[in-house]
Amino acid sequence: MEEKRQIKKGKYAADISSIMEANQRIRPHVLRTPVLTSTSLNAMSGRQLHFKCECLQRCGAFKFRGACNAVFSLNDEEAAKGVVTHSSGNHAAALSLAAKLRGIPAYIIVPKNAPACKVENVKRYGGQVIFSEATIKSREETAARVQQQTGGILIPSSNDGRIMSGQGTISLEFLEQVPHLDTLVVPISGGGMISGVALAAKSINPAIRILAAEPNGADDAAQSKSLKNLGLTKSAGRIIRLPETNTIADGLKAFLGDCTWPVVRDLVEDVITVEDSEILKAMKLCFQILKVVVEPSGAIGLAAVLSDAFQKNPAWKDCNNIGIVVSGGNVDLGVLWDSLNKAI
């Protein structure tokens, strides 16, 4: 019988109360994204699949939920100073738009090697781009300097209770749209989305299973969870940080933090890892069958459900009604074409 976990208030950086508050706060600004189904994909997987299309969210990704909640959580005095982050991806664009909606500045530190299309997204939404070197150290040092100069509030991309709460609103919508889901499959990177999703979903239905999907080339979460399963440390696992990552899923290269890891450690049942070739195949299926544009990070949930690691694991044989979060649709076409040419 599935264990029913009771989530104590205050145990984590977010909880069902903060997620419900976030839902009210961001409701005027975010889209209630649709859920798509496909008899063809059901037949391929042998399950009933339900796709929560965050690729159709504002800015093209789920990140807008968390960024919006963080920005509109600030009091007027804090907000007037603006917000700061370092990112070259969906969080940068999402924070820029959220700040624009509130009428405050957004200072976005972007590494010099960031794709031009992503820099343009930040500018399009009103963010002030400040370039740094490509290293994490340079990004963090530049962000700290900009904070000191402007007094802006740092808004991390994942490791923050406000971000987690905003992302958790995905579960509130998804379980209203499809109440009988028994499993959720969610991409994992910094853990802001899956931790918020897990906290909300487990509060609504303690028996629901939460599975993470991760690229083999960036499998830090899987390694962190394997330590927990092996019981090698007194703290039941620890955050693993990889010396380098190598995956087409550019949105899944971040590492877990001290806010997100405890939720992943305690509430995520397993991490399913897949190869980039499986992600590309899943992207193609999303294009051809669901008729939606999905970035690699967004297609990984389908890739995980179709993988042998999931299909042949007896632990998941009773996962019959599966919700898959399609996290984003901001495709870097240059990288995609190169990857497709290598795969052919």
Image (cartoon, grey):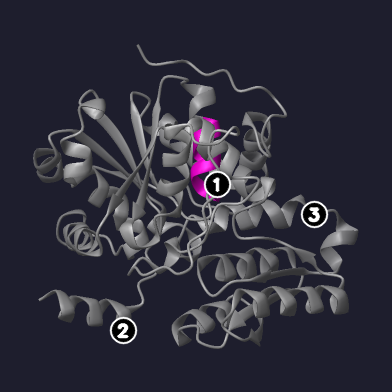
SS assignment for the magenta stretch, majority? helix
- State which tag comes first along the sequence, 3 or 1: 3
Q: Position of residue 334 (x, y in %)?
A: 31, 84
- State which tag comes first along the sequence, 2 or 3: 3
Q: Position of residue 184 (x, y in %)?
A: 37, 36
The residue located at (18%, 76%) in the rendering is 340
Does residue 37 appear in this view?
yes
Front residue of 307 and 235: 235
Q: Position of residue 207 (x, y in %)?
A: 42, 19
From this view, report whether residue 303 is shown above or below residue 252.
above
From this view, report whether residue 84 is shown above or below residue 128.
above
Helix, strand or loop at mark 1: helix
- State which tag comes first along the sequence, 2 or 1: 1
Binning the other alpha carbons within 10 Å of mark 1 as few (below 14), some (14 to 19) or many (20 upward) gives: many
Q: Which residue is mark 1?
A: 167
The amino acid on which the numbered mark 1 sits, given as a three-letter code, is Gln
Q: Is residue 236 magenta?
A: no
Q: Which labelled disc corresponds to residue 334?
A: 2
The amino acid on which the numbered mark 3 sits, given as a three-letter code, is Leu
CA gap, disc 2 and disc 1: 29 Å
From this view, report whether residue 166 is shown above or below residue 202.
below
Relative to 86, 328 lies left or right: left
User: Magenta region: which residues?
Assistant: 192-200
Relative to 47, 81 lies left or right: right
The residue located at (75%, 64%) in the rendering is 154
Tags 2 and 3 in contact by the CB under 8 Å rule?
A: no
Binning the other alpha carbons within 10 Å of mark 3 as few (below 14), some (14 to 19) or many (20 upward) gives: some
From this view, report whether residue 341 is shown above or below residue 174.
below
Q: Position of residue 10 (x, y in %)?
A: 72, 29
Q: Which residue is mark 3?
A: 74
Tags 3 and 1 in contact by the CB under 8 Å rule?
A: no
